[in-house]
Image (cartoon, rainbow, N blue to C red):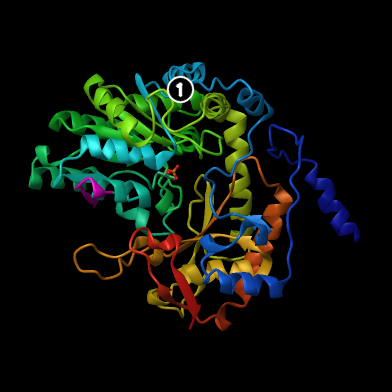
Amino acid sequence: MSPNTLLTIGQQFERRSWAEPWKIKMVEPLNMITREQRQKALDDAGFNTFLLRSDDVYIDLLTDSGTGAMSDRQWAGMMLGDEAYAGSRNFYHLEAAIQKYYGYKFIVPTHQGRGAEHLISQVAIKPGQYVPGNMYFTTTRLHQELAGGIFVDVIIDEAHDPQILHPFKGNIDLAKLETLIKREGAEKIAYVSVAGTVNMAGGQPVSMANIKDLRSMTNKYGIRLFLDATRMVENAFFIQEREEGYANRSIAEILIEFCNYTDGAWMSAKKDNLVNIGGWLAVNDETIYEELRNLVVVYEGLHTYGGLAGRDLEAIAIGIAESVQDEHIHSRIGQVRYLGELLTTWGIPIVHPVGGHAIFLDARAFYPHLEQLKFPAQTLAAELYLDSGIRSMERGIASAGRNAETGEHNQPKLELTRLTIPRRVYTQAHMDVVAESVRAVYEDRENTTGLKMVHEPKYLRFFQARFERL
Ligand SMILES: *Cc1c(COP(=O)(O)O)cnc(C)c1O
């Protein structure tokens, strides 16, 4: 080591790092296979990372959905499952946790987020009504459309630009919303669908000011406002960090204030709530609750279990309380940022600012020589897997599907490959390995030729589509 290096190390003692507010009690060994084996696995999977076997994956950044590590308290809670068909005590624990931390009155559990989306869409949308939202999420939009709704994107324009450093790129453009309301009439709007944070825009947050203004506008026209609360705790972190007046408010205080401006929420508990399966729906209006409570019996199960075991309900209740702790969310987002900063230092194009749950590689900028119809983001996900066994996900033209009327591919502005960080699972050393693999694929970018789709399922095609190299 040169004296210079020693000096730098000496200076590092001034550093103040974040670290995980937990230690590891049990480990799960990872599989590492050879490049030849990965090539075979990729061919068998039709170049679609959703079709890989997880045993063939080294670091799995496919999704943060249901992939988190539960705490020892949650595992202990699993043993307290009351597996009664009706009125399980764990349901009442969950109900109390949602009322305390999210503030809604009436709760319906569901097997996961899309179960909740299905129910709220069936109850709150009449065929032909519009559902304006801040960009779309795949399952959310599909359920709105299956209920006869017409999705309209009313997110601010900045959200579609991966390089603009707007602090709240998830905000709704109130002028766009009001134009729609005036053009179609308030009775043609089913509800406003607001997601905090916006996954497809890169995990970008919504500001408290925006939700307050939205509440005033929807009140003025008598329109309901529902929240996709899946990553609302992460959204609260950004409000605390960036919005005036919130620096000294706790994550829990910010969360409940935000929810208070909305009429209800649906939740994929597999994300913020730190469990491997589960979801819920919560509303303040008793009439809507009555309908939801009735419909849940048809599709999920009785209204006190909604397709979940008693032990799962308990794990969610405990997970909610853990998820709103400031130290938890600071280290969660600190880890995502650590990866983002490494990649940015190395000149690799990613979506800025870095959002809450993932790093989004900008595949258009990564592969400027590949037109969008050659699936650049899908290609990048395949190349990353081949290089190191890291599994990521396409969020671009394959995810966007086809236009229901014209049958043409939807061609979204954002063509992204998502490196999603599971909660409480990987270490900083794993993040280093990921960053180095992205850099290796970036250095080889000019040799990459793109993909063509050879099998296309009708619904949510990105899950099961197959591709071949061009
Ligand atoms: C995951 C997700 C959903 C759907 O939830 P599932 O639990 O996967 O069914 C809905 N909205 C957002 C923003 C999500 O990330």
> Residue visible at 46% across and 16% down?
92
For residue 149: magenta?
A: yes
Q: Could you say where residue 152 lies in the image, as x and y percent from the top left?
A: 23, 51
Is residue 249 at all visible to an observer of this figure?
A: no
Task: Classify the position of the N terminus by image quarter.
Answer: bottom right
Q: Secondary structure at mark 1?
A: loop
Position of 216 with respect to 411 (left or right) is left
Query: What residue did someone put label 1 on?
Result: 85
Which segment did they paint magenta? 146-154
Q: Could you say where residue 285 lies in the image, as x and y percent from the top left?
A: 25, 22
Position of 5 with respect to 407 (left or right) is right
Image position of 451 with respect to 235: above or below: below
For residue 445: magenta?
A: no
Amino acid type assigned to the residue bearing label 1 in the image: Tyr
> Residue visible at 74% across and 61% down?
32
Q: Could you say where residue 21 lies in the image, as x and y percent from the top left?
A: 69, 32
Q: Could you say where residue 401 lies in the image, as x and y percent from the top left?
A: 33, 63
Instruction: Specify the quarter for ligand 1.
Output: top left
Looking at the picture, tell me which residue is in the foreground, 213 or 181. 181
